[in-house]
Amino acid sequence: MSTIFKALRKSAGVTQAELAKKAGLYQANISEIENGLIDPSFSTVERYIARLGYQLVPVPTRIPTVFDFCLHINEDIAIAREDWAFRSIIQLNDNLTQAEPEVANALAALPPQSVGDKRFDALIAGVVQYRLESKKLPVPGWVNREDRILSEWWTVDKKANKFDDLENTTPACFKSRRILLAESELQSV
């Protein structure tokens, strides 16, 4: 819960002190919550999130959220395991494919933190957009932020040898982020 609190606050562009004033809490309490030092009551969670303009909606699932995937991908990127990070993204793709529409939407709702590599941040946004649009679901705003678009083209498969062929098989939501990734890479086997 602590990482969710921090992500929501940062996404809203609010400091701990500003949130404390809005929520009727002490800044030190917010710091303790965000650092996992205290476990807040449900009413505190509701008040905290409501002051950021959000509400809690329970969605029972065993599938990790996009936010959770990004935490693990960040760890992989930090220790230079890009192949593991890519496998996690493929698993995220598969999970969103298999999830019921309302669950898929909920899994992608919370804006994830950067994974520490702009290429993978853009790729994650592309996967979320690709899968939600395939289910005719709305795409959360964080997906289309400028920091989810690359300034230079990235060919995900280093072994791909024909740019034109790859460009023709890359879904539009990836090309708009300057990512080349064959649609076949996103199909479960």
Image (cartoon, grey):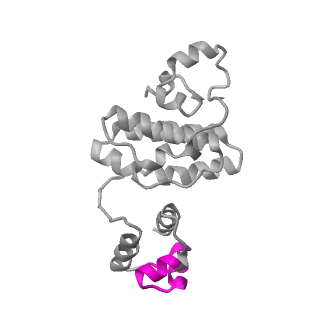
Q: Point out the image quarter for the C terminus.
A: top left
Count of numbered marks: 0
Q: Residue at x 45, y 85 (%)?
A: 25
Seen in the picture, residue 115 relative to 29 is either above or below; the reply is: above
Q: Is residue 185 magenta?
A: no
Quarter-wise, where is residue 151 in the image? Answer: top right
* Residue sitting at the far right: 80
Evaluate whether residue 63 shows in this view. no
Q: Residue at x 47, y 25 (%)?
A: 171
Main secondary structure found in the magenta portion: helix
Evaluate whether residue 71 shows in this view. yes
The x, y position of residue 7, in whole percent, is 51, 62
The x, y position of residue 15, in whole percent, is 55, 73
| Left or right: residue 148 compared with residue 107 | right
Q: Is residue 36 magenta?
A: yes
Q: Point out the image quarter for the N terminus.
A: bottom left
Seen in the picture, residue 137 relative to 183 is either above or below; the reply is: below
Q: Residue at x 58, y 48 (%)?
A: 73
The x, y position of residue 22, in whole percent, is 43, 79
Which range is magenta?
Answer: 18-39
The answer to which of 62 and 143 lies nearer the viewer is: 143
The answer to which of 164 and 103 lies nearer the viewer is: 164
| Left or right: residue 37 compared with residue 156 | left
